[in-house]
Image: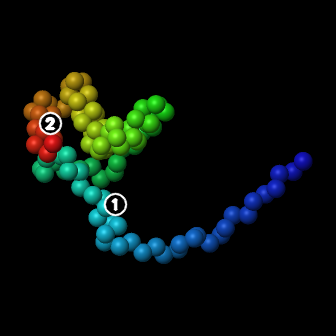
Amino acid sequence: MRYKQHKIDPKPRNPSPTITPEFEARRYAPATDLPKNIEMGKKPVTTKFPAKVQEILLDTSKVRDRSAYIRRAVLEQMRKDGLISESYYQGFVSNHKQQN
């Protein structure tokens, strides 16, 4: 039995999308949990999580600001592993406490 071959649409659905300034502002919103003097990386670092962890991270009633939460966890682990200095970590933590 041969499988039916699906045709691929050769034309993109929206060949010239309009990107408004409002969309751009939301798309690349600044990280409000970081001190002003810390420069953000140019590309995001992404990773997959186990299903149960992902479920918790995506639940806004449990984790209000997912990016800030993950950033804090990674920075704390990097401090414990000796990859960042205690003063760098404390500068980050003190900025976060001021905002909450």
Q: Is residue 91 placed above or below 82 in the rendered structure? A: below
Q: As shown in the figure, which amino acid type bears the numbered disc 2?
A: Val
How far from the left and from the top, in percent, is residue 22?
Answer: 31, 69
Question: Residue at 30% across / 43% down in the picture?
Answer: 64
* Image label count: 2
Q: Is residue 23 placed above or below 42 in the rendered structure? A: below
Question: Residue at 14% across / 45% down in the picture?
Answer: 99
Question: Residue at 22% across / 24% down in the picture?
Answer: 80
Q: Residue furthest front?
A: 61
Mark toward the start of the polypeptide (2 vs 1): 1
Mark 2 lies on residue = 93
Q: Residue furthest right?
A: 1
How far from the left and from the top, in percent, is residue 3?
Answer: 83, 51
Q: Quadrant of residue 23?
A: bottom left
Residue 54 in sight: yes
How far from the left and from the top, in percent, is residue 34?
Answer: 18, 46
Tell me the SS state at disc 2.
Answer: helix
Within 10 Å of disc 2 (Cα), the crowding (few <14, some 14-19, many 20+) is: some
Q: As shown in the figure, which amino acid type bears the numbered disc 1?
A: Arg
Q: Is residue 37 placed above or below 56 in the rendered structure? A: below
Q: CA distance from mark 2 to mark 1?
A: 25 Å
Query: The C terminus lies in which quarter of the figure?
Result: top left
Question: Residue at 53% across / 72% down in the picture?
Answer: 14
Say left or right for 27 vs 82: right
- Mark drawn on residue 27: 1
Q: Is residue 6 placed above or below 60 in the rendered structure? A: below
Tell me the SS state at disc 1.
Answer: helix
Q: Quadrant of residue 45?
A: top left
Within 10 Å of disc 1 (Cα), the crowding (few <14, some 14-19, many 20+) is: few
Say left or right for 85 vs 6: left
Residue 95 in sight: no
